Image: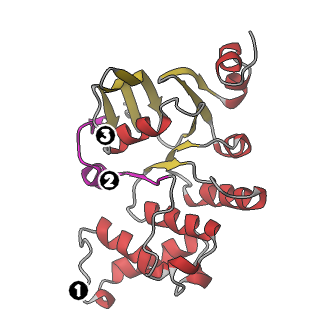
């Protein structure tokens, strides 16, 4: 029996008053696929991410995670079902250490919430997962550094670790390399690839070098509609994409 898609959007719409921002999006992502969502500013990419992750409710249509409808659920409920996302802006606890940030994420995923009254040292499973996560995002040497004192690229690495701390198998990354220089972006692209190995990945990204390095497929969103979806070479050569996104006449 063929398993359902890891993530499936069906006839998804989002309206704000009379303005339709997402216009009937259909998208199916298979388990383990890495998909880049690209498009010009104002295309509706962040709104689409909000609909998938529960930070906004669709006006019509559905979102399914491994065949289960999640549209309309709260973000924490969707996260518990196995979908996690990061945001454009770095979102960490600046006065906690790197290790404490990651441990908070792991504890939350295990159902402990932010209960700091527990004897954390006795939670061996959480400690082991936190140690592994620390190594996975390359921050072992910075374990006891306050998050506020990390360089920007390492803060983004920490946020990636927090996102992965839930144990989710479907991961949404919103402009993960935004604000990075070329060498930082190259390093972080390699980190994303290794840290999310085996997971289903959907990312919004403007840096086409990053897209080319990471994506198995590309979805092009223009004016709230998916106008192309497929392997990078096919999308790049699509005349409709060239006209609508790259500004090249057909």
> Which segment is the magenta one?
66-87
In the image, residue 122 lies at what x, y percent?
29, 89
Asked whether the viewer can see residue 129, the reply is no
From mark 1 to mark 3, how far is it between C-alphas?
34 Å
Name the residue at 47% across, 31% down.
44
- Number of numbered discs overlaid on the protein picture: 3
Which element carries disc 2, helix, strand or loop?
A: helix
Residue 203 appears at what percent x and percent y?
A: 54, 44
Horizontal side, residue 194 vs residue 98: left or right: right
Residue ID at (45%, 69%): 92
- Residue situated furthest top in the rendering: 250
The dot on residue 31 is none
Q: Residues within 10 Å of mark 2 (few under 14, many from 20)?
A: many
Residue designated by label 1: 118
Q: Is residue 82 magenta?
A: yes
Which badge, 1 or 2, comes first in the chain's sequence? 2
Residue placed under numbered mark 2 in the picture? 79
- Disc 1 or disc 3, which is closer to the eye? 3
């Amino acid at each position: 029996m063929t398993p359902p898609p890891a993530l499936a959007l069906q006839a998804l719409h989002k309206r704000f008053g009379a303005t339709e921002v997402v216009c009937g999006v259909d998208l199916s992502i298979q388990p383990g696929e890495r998909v880049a969502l690209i498009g010009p500013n104002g295309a509706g990419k962040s709104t689409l991410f909000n609909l998938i992750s529960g930070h906004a409710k669709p006006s019509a249509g559905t979102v399914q995670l491994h065949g289960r409808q999640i549209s309309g659920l709260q973000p924490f409920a969707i996260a518990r079902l196995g979908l996690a996302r990061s945001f454009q802006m770095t979102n960490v606890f600046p006065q906690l250490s790197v290790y404490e940030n990651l441990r908070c994420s792991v504890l939350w995923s295990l159902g402990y919430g932010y209960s700091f009254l527990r004897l954390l040292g006795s939670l061996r499973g959480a400690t082991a997962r936190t140690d592994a996560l620390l190594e996975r995002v390359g921050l072992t040497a910075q374990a006891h550094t306050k998050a506020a004192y990390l360089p920007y690229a390492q803060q983004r690495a920490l946020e990636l670790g927090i996102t992965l701390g839930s144990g989710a198998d479907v991961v949404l990354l919103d402009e993960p390399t935004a604000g990075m220089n070329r060498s930082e972006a190259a390093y972080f692209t390699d980190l994303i690839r290794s840290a999310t190995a085996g997971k289903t990945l959907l990312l919004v990204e403007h840096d086409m070098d990053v897209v080319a390095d990471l994506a198995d497929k590309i979805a092009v969103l223009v004016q709230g509609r998916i106008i192309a979806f497929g392997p990078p070479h096919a999308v790049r050569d699509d005349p409709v994409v060239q006209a609508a996104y790259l500004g090249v006449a057909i």
